[in-house]
Amino acid sequence: MSELERIAMFMGGADSIPEFLSHSAGRYRHQTAVEAKQDGERLQKTYLQLKSDSDALSAAFEARGLSQKHVAFIGGLSYEWLVAFFGVTGSSNIAVPMDKDLSLDDLVTLVLQADISMLFVDSSMSHIVQQLRHSCETLEVIVCFQAGGPFPSIAEFIRDTRCSEKLRSTHVDADQTAMIVFTSSETGGYKGAMLSHRNICHNIICSVYLAGIEAFEPGGCTVVVLPPHHMFAVTSGMLVPLLFYGLTLCLSGGLSGYLSSIQQFRPSVLFMVPMLVEGLHKRISREAARTGQLNLEFFGGQLRTIICGGAYLDAEWVVKYKKLGVNLLNGYGITECSPLVSCNRPNGIISHSVGLVGPEPYCRVRIEDDEIQVQGSIVMKQYYKDCKSTAEAFDQGWFRTGDLGYLDQHNYLYITGRKKDLIILKDGNNISPVGIEQSIERHPLVDQSLVYADGKKGGETLAAIIHPDYDYAVNNGYTDVRLALDELIQMLNDNSPAFRRIRRLEVSEKPFDKLALKKELRAPTRITREKVNHD
């Protein structure tokens, strides 16, 4: 029996999320599925409890006649978020996770664009919900993840629904859309990638094949630190460890608490973006300077593997973690591919590569005009109600990633640059600079603008160069142009999520060649064949 056949058999042949949850609950039953700190106490839920709570929500949807509805998720990861996710996808509804830190205008745009009729939201965000209701007439049902909010909690929604305690045996078709996940458009808007149950389940197979079927022992744990509106967090960070490996998902409560959660829960594996990989190592190094020992005991001593994705990772970090006894497995993925396309394997790490390509027929990669293109059952079919973007994204059935690279003779993938006009920060956020520049240039005081990742701060924040319209300034009484531009940037920042804020502004007295400067400042870190071969 091949390794792929073993993986599929271990999954019980599941090709939908509810089917896989049911199979995993039957296998891991009374093991702890989710653990979290809640109100000063540790909350623990078994696999059977998670399935029971999710089934109850699915049954409530069925009893209310809610099917094929687009359901938005706005809030941080919690046990209730997971119950809602499995309850929605298990009842033929479609989960649409959204970044809770987006501006109200952006959230309104996404709710309308995705035809959202139902919303799950953190009770602490009730002020936003009221404004969403006013702006979005499509919203029919609103449920709070937690009790104590202005709308019914999940428990109250279930209690108030007259339905059987047992979930019906409705079959969820594998090719039905399970999620709509938004990604940035090069023009400054958003595109909603429609991912089916089959897309996601087959990506789980690819992920396990690359990591190894016996990579992690059931009963271990991982601390979930990535926000749940990213597919890397959903597929790789939650579904793979939970449903396949039988690992406990320990919820950190967000990025601010992830270090203390790692200390408390002692994970054996973490799923991270480069910013967190670098931050964790710096914390370890500071502790080593204090104690005179470079090791992982400060973080529980169990960490053996970190799987990194979401943005470019310098190869030096692979070497640094190896000295600590930790395999840092760098990978590559994209939302439209559910997301994992390639990843280094524990017994086959090439530090400058983003790893071995996932197995056929689930994933195939070709290089056309230096662009990485992907085909297979992990690839979405289309963007939601966006025929133009869908047509532009495919070349005779191959998804065009917009990333440049090449394959070696062993089918390992290397990234050499980007074709798309997008900025990818180290925290994994994709940003369209064009949209920000358009907002800046709407002000008549601005003649030109260019937004880029600020290399002086490790590429983790945005900077802008602006050439003012000095004639307009003189004719309209501007005596301090710099102050006026600072105020403009501050106004835009106040209406933007933290990752999309301009942190540094440079004023150019002379007009600049935008195309040439863009090539210089937005040039991605490039990995050349010569560098790889030399190293």
Image: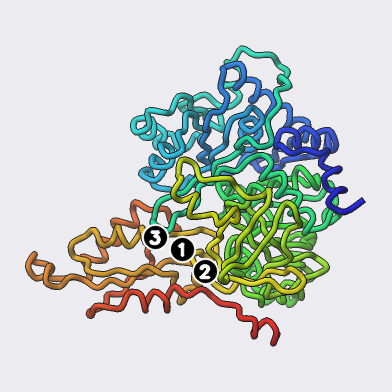
Question: How far is the residue under mark 2 from the one under mark 3?
Answer: 22 Å
Asked whether disc 1 touches disc 2, contact meaning CB atoms under 8 Å apart, the reply is yes
Q: Quadrant of residue 45?
A: top right
Mark 2 residue element: strand
The quarter of the picture where the C terminus appears is bottom right
Q: Mark 3 or mark 1: name the one nearer the start of the chain.
A: 1
- Image location of residue 111, percent across then percent down: 43, 37
Residue 105: image x %, image y %? Answer: 35, 44
Judging by the rendered image, the residue that carries numbered circle 3 is 501
Query: Residue 196 lies in what quarter of the image?
Result: top right
> Which marked residue is nearer to the observer: mark 2 or mark 3?
2
Task: Indicate whether 490 appears above or below 144.
Answer: below
User: Would you name the residue on which mark 2 appears?
Assistant: 418
- Vertical order, 206 against 354 (above or below): above
Near mark 2 (Cα within 10 A), the count class, few <14, some 14-19 or many ≥20, is many
Q: Amino acid at mark 2?
A: Arg
Residue at the (31%, 74%) spot, across then down? 506
Q: On the picture, is 426 further left or further right than 55?
A: left
**Labelled pair 3, 1 in contact (Cβ < 8 Å):** no
Q: Amino acid at mark 3?
A: Arg
| 143 and 265: which is toward the camera | 143
Report the label total: 3
Q: For mark 1, what is the residue?
A: 422
- Between the residue at mark 3 and the residue at mark 1, the CA separation in whole angstroms equals 15 Å
